[in-house]
Image: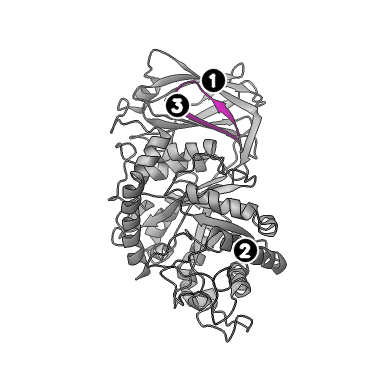
Amino acid sequence: MPGTTRRMTRHVKAATLAAASAGAAALMVSALAIPAQAGATGPGAAGARLTAARQQPATATIEGYRRYQRIAGFGASEAFGEAEVIQNAPAATQRQALSLLYSRTSGAGLTILRNEVRASPGNSIEPAAPASPSATPSYVPLSALHDDSGQLWLAQQIKARYGVTDVFADAWSAPPFMKTNDSVSDGGTLCGAPGATCASGDWRQAYANYLTQYARDYAKAGVPLSYVGPENEANLAPPYSSMVMSPAQTANFMQYLGPTLARSGLRTRAECCATEGWDYAQQYAAAIESDPLANAFTPLFTSHGYTEAPASPLAGWDKPVWETEWSTFEKWDPAWDDGTDASGLSWAQRIETGLTKANLSAFLYWWGSSTPTFNGDNESLIQINGTTVTPSGRLWAFASYSRFVRPGAVRIGAVTPDGNLGLTAFRNTDGSIAIVALNTGTSAVPVTFSLRGTGTPDGAVVTPYLTDSVSHVAEQTATRVADATFGATLPARSLVTYVIHPRPQPSRR
């Protein structure tokens, strides 16, 4: 079963990375300066946590005149059959899982779904090889493939229920007959790519047509894809769906995929390269940049965070960058703050670092949901166990951003001299401002927020939403802006989102 093989390989991969580079988690902890305290929390009651203060107040300056990247959103995937788990669940379980992931009032308010373009027998839209690369292919409709392993059903559900329309897809592998090893698994390279010669011929254009057909099927079903990508962690050849493509081979193929999508009349564009980590991302981005045609048709670069965290901009790349897959693999851990790299507080730090240091336009976790029988580890934001749905601290870390930093928002300046505070700020398209403040210290911190160049009028309402070991994006007592400032206290080991609405707040689902 592909999912089982993937789980085993992911655990082996995590162990290998630990031996090679002192561990991916250790690297992230070091890079993000995650405090060593385990389970440290403030006082028990929310009111006490919000009012308890240490001696020295902090300052935070929000600079509306400084504009950085535009935000596409936050999300996750339900690849490798996870979407079918939700699809086949009882109606009440379906509603709870979808609400936790996509609702802006009771869940994370995610806005991006990442699909897997499946190539294995029984799951592929092109299960049989045509006579030659130029012969007419026989495509299978998604309706004959269990709604694309539940992914199409999920995309339709979140659009209808929550207005989520940003769905994109990556292929882990080309169909086996297009590859040098004639297999979906164990790597192999696309036939026709530089250095990859096959007796069957050059399949580059046929593969571009195949990916475009997948996008066409989604558009026909009422869920147009925003992007489609040709590969996933192409430096690896694991015993599950995979394809090895060097940076140069990848750049070469983007010369086929980008123009083919452009000619299709679809809104879908090409993205690349779903690399394993930021170290590989730089290599693949450089290859695309040095190829004028590939660069012209690659408006988005995507990468994961496994081998190196996204903590710096990609040198030379001046277009949007998304982090599209990342997780940890230990036993399921739903804690907000237990000192591990799976905790919600740790993931809040990763999101903040990715947005401010790597200028990410989107941040995605690996799976939105999974089950204990499928993996039982931390690869998901929620866990579905029969009819029981359990959220994790990671989910609430994402919620503190995704509920309030909406697609189209622009990151603006946010600075503080306090080393225990992580700070980001955004202006949404509706004029609201979201300030996300993370206190990694063991004491509550009183903070004076100074609003410069934001145009916020006196009297504007500031609503805090608190997340810590007790509260999950819980609305707190509002305050008001006076003389372009407002005061607040950040509880220890907490994440607080402050939403400033100069005008009446629009309704949310």
Q: Does the magenta stretch include residue 251?
A: no
Quarter of the figure with residue 82: bottom left
Against 446, is 34 above or below? below
Q: Where is residue 378 in the image (x, y as percent from the top left)?
A: 34, 50
Residue for badge 3: 421
Residue flagged by tag 1: what amino acid is it? Phe
Which label was assigned to residue 486?
1
Circle 3/circle 2 CB separation < 8 Å: no
Can the viewer see residue 342? no
Q: Could you tell me how far apart the alpha carbons at marks 3 and 2 are, in whole angstroms? A: 44 Å
**Span highlighted in magenta in the image:** 412-426
The kind of secondary structure element at disc 3 is strand
Residue flagged by tag 2: what amino acid is it? Asn
361 or 480: nearer the eye? 361
Label 1 crowd (10 A; few <14 / some 14-19 / many >=20): some
Q: In which quarter of the image is the N terminus?
A: bottom left
173 or 100: nearer the eye? 173
Residue found at the very far top of the displayed protein: 55
Which label was assigned to residue 252?
2
Circle 3/circle 1 CB separation < 8 Å: no
Against 399, is 168 above or below? below
Quarter of the figure with residue 23: top left
Label 3 crowd (10 A; few <14 / some 14-19 / many >=20): many
- Please count the marks in the image: 3
Q: Position of residue 94 (x, y in %)?
A: 41, 59
Q: Where is residue 370 in the image (x, y as percent from the top left)?
A: 36, 57
Q: Residue at 57% of width from left, 57% of height from top?
A: 272
Q: Which of marks 3 and 1 is in front?
A: 3
Q: Could you tell me how far apart the alpha carbons at marks 3 and 1 are, in whole angstroms? A: 17 Å
Q: Which of marks 3 and 2 is in front?
A: 2
Label 2 crowd (10 A; few <14 / some 14-19 / many >=20): many
